[in-house]
């Protein structure tokens, strides 16, 4: 039992669009506005709920990464003092992940581009990206994150967000993961939501349950190389591209990817 406790280390990756109370792009795109500040406070509440649930379930270490828009969304003074936080941009991507974690939670995530009624749905950039495929399958940020975590032998144990997000998570990662639906999408910028207080209680309970899945859920490990295709909203982005991906058409690039860290950008 003591040996098990020493191994219960959790990594939390966060986004902003999937948080309860967040439903408008003005809350997520313009940093420092009153709307954005409101959304970020709501995010901190959901993070702390997940942290509490992880420790309630026996975690001995919890590290939380700010994964939204340049990693500048957290209010450090609001974080549960038992947790550690990652803010800012760094390389290589696995510098912290290789420290060893037994599972991951994805908090405040959203569905992929063009998901019908997916709240604030997009893939990577709501302003510049259009569609994204891995081995011919339309994919989004949930699958991207799971692959990066899986390369470090970390399974995704829980995903939170709207109803379309949790459906996408189960389709890509299986029904054994814990999902917490904090809102129902009515359109891209409208949702039927619980109160933030209730959403946090649900996330805390979900995190406690997810801790029981450690050792039962396998990391996401697709076989490399992968064929990744990026479609952008503006052909000018592809016109200016200087890398080694193949141009498929005016707005689309494709590349054979041999390393997990290369699945995000062409």
Image (tube, rainbow, N blue to C red):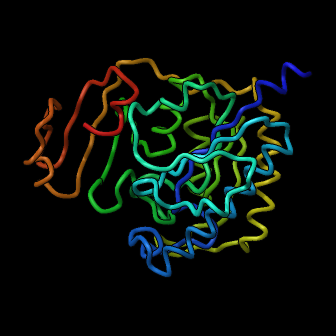
Residue 4 location, x and y as percent?
84, 22
Residue found at the very far left of the displayed protein: 239
- Is 43 displayed left or right of 207 in the figure? left
Screen quadrant of the N terminus: top right
Q: Position of residue 207 (x, y in %)?
A: 77, 46
Looking at this view, name the residue that lies furthest to the bottom. Answer: 34
Depth check: 80 or 167 in front? 80
Total number of numbered labels? 0
State the image coordinates of residue 213 (x, y, percent, origin top left).
78, 32
The quadrant where residue 201 appears:
bottom right
Q: Is residue 192 left or right of residue 56?
A: left
At a point 71% along the width and 71% down the height, the residue shown is 196
Residue 257: image location, x then y, percent: 30, 24
Q: Is residue 265 left or right of residue 58?
A: left
The quadrant in which the C terminus is found is: top left
Q: Residue at x 15, y 29 (%)?
A: 244
The answer to whether residue 200 is above or below residue 244 is: below
Residue closer to the observer: 20 or 46: 46
Give the answer, above or below, for where 16 lies relative to 57. below
Q: Is residue 183 left or right of residue 231?
A: right
Say which residue appears at 60% left-offset and 59% top-offset: 76
């Amino acid at each position: 039992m003591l040996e098990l406790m020493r191994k219960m280390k959790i990594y939390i990756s966060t986004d902003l669009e999937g948080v309860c109370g967040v439903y408008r792009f003005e809350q997520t795109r313009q940093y420092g506005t009153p709307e954005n500040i409101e959304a970020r406070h709501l995010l901190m509440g959901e993070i702390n709920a997940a942290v509490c649930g992880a420790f309630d379930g026996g975690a001995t270490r919890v590290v939380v990464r700010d994964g939204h828009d340049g990693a500048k969304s957290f209010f450090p003074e609001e974080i549960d003092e038992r947790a550690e936080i990652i803010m800012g941009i760094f390389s290589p991507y696995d510098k912290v992940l290789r420290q060893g974690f037994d599972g991951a939670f994805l908090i405040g995530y959203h569905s992929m581009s063009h998901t019908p009624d997916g709240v604030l749905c997009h893939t990577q950039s709501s302003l510049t990206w259009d569609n994204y495929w891995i081995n011919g399958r339309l994919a989004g940020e949930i699958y991207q994150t799971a692959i990066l975590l899986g390369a470090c032998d970390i399974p995704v144990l829980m995903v939170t967000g709207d109803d379309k997000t949790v459906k996408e998570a189960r389709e890509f990662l299986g029904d054994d993961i814990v999902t917490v639906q904090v809102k129902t999408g009515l359109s891209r910028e409208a949702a039927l939501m619980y109160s933030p207080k209730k959403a946090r209680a649900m996330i805390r309970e979900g995190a406690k349950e997810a801790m029981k899945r450690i050792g039962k859920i396998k990391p996401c490990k697709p076989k490399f190389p992968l064929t990744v295709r990026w479609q952008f909203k503006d052909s000018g982005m592809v016109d200016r591209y200087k890398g080694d991906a193949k141009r498929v058409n005016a707005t689309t690039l494709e590349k054979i990817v041999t390393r997990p860290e290369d699945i995000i950008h062409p």
